[in-house]
Amino acid sequence: MKRILHSIATGIILTGIALPVQSCILKDTQPKKIALTTQYVEEAPKEQYVKVALLLDTSNSMDGLINQAKSQLWDIVNEFAHVRCGNETRPTLEIALYEYGNDNLSAREGYVRQVLSFSSDLDDISEKLFSLTTNGGEEFCGKVINTSLKQLDWGKNQDDLKMIFIAGNEPFTQGKLNYKDAVTDAKEKGIVVNTIFCGGYQQGIQTEWKNGAILTGGEYMSIDHNREVVYVKTPYDKVIIELNSKLNDTYISYGAAGVRKKAMQSTQDANAAELEEAVVVKRAVSKSSRVYKNSSWDMVDAVAEEEIELAEIPKEDLPKELQNKSTKEIEAYLEKKKVEREKIQKKIQELNSKREEYIAESNKAEKGELENALLRAIKKQAADKNYSWDK
């Protein structure tokens, strides 16, 4: 963090100094008298982040939990498309993923594995969720929390929203590392630990899941991880899915990584389709929002965010249809795709608004157990940091 040095005459008494530090929290505004010879003011962070680490039990009995995570990811992402920090800033959502309690994992590492470090790449997050499989094992909650604290880059901005969600169904006390030490460490770092017990509410309390949350001011929740969500079909689903395919055609990959990522985009659409038609729709809505960014491989996003110079891209890294075009011709082509994309995204958003109204009027609207638990805790803790939602 850069510091800006302001020299102030020795012995001058300053009253009510205003420090220009960006924050989602309303600071103490009472005037204070401060005697200073030199004042250091830290520059405000350029971005605000919402950092969510999901720690999922992947032992034998947790297939239902993993399936809920796969299908309800998009509901959670779509909520964050509307979040603001204070009145202006749109925070960046980053999700990390850990699995624990699986016999296929290393005993030396405490049956814990980082599946994905903090990422805002929604296709990558989806791919990693679909890669999870279950197998019996030892579930050490203290160990996986401690590992996530050490391995992840949580940042030092106190105004970022930093949360751990750990879900499982065995006693929270298992393992050599005391969970109280792990959650105390989290609290000291400004990270809230939320616990989701997959089973009865009272059983979760008896097995210390509630205590694991309240020690950091987090939420304790219990869910039926095997409950199947009844999705409401609407007259708008088919059109949104068709628009999603057209949306994919506006992405222009570049480089070897781009070819792989373009294929991943389609693969994750197919993964969603294997679950439920409604999941494809929700993923399409995510792809039509501000949170779906692909400047690392898509030329349209990369040019819009000024991350590449077209003239500097090797010819062989361009898609075949652009390799024999001039820079101006490529610019015109990308601008056309950008306009086309924006129209499709706007149409998806409009149709989704009608879709949500239809579901609400059907009186059959239902949210998934995991989704309910996550959003309830996130919104409560976000409010404490002055985050708000557009809708």
Image (spheres, rainbow, N blue to C red):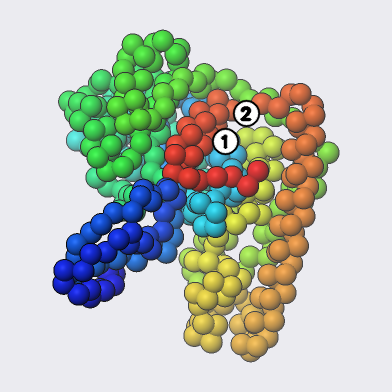
Q: Position of residue 65 (x, y in %)?
A: 49, 27
Q: Would residue 110 be found to the left or right of residue 17 on screen?
A: left
Label 2: how many Cα within 10 Å (few below 14, some 14–19, many 20+): some
Label 1: how many Cα within 10 Å (few below 14, some 14–19, many 20+): many
Q: Position of residue 310 (x, y in %)?
A: 55, 82
Q: Secondary structure at mark 1?
A: helix
Q: Which residue is mark 1?
A: 72
Which kind of residue does numbered mark 2 sit on? Lys
Identify the mark nearer the N-term, 2 or 1. 1
Q: Would residue 340 be found to the left or right of residue 227 on screen?
A: right
- Front-lying residue, 4 or 61: 4
Question: Where is 54 relative to 64, above or below?
Answer: below
Please tell me the numbered disc located at residue 214.
Answer: none
Q: Position of residue 166 (x, y in %)?
A: 38, 31
Could you tell me if the residues under marks 2 and 1 are in contact, i.e. CB atoms within 8 Å?
yes
Q: Quadrant of the C terminus?
A: top right
Q: Which residue is mark 2?
A: 367
Which kind of residue does numbered mark 1 sit on? Gln
- Front-lying residue, 342 or 325: 342
- Front-lying residue, 41 or 143: 41
Q: Can residue 103 be seen in this snapshot?
A: no
Q: Residue at x 34, y 66 (%)?
A: 43
Q: Can residue 390 be seen in this snapshot?
A: yes
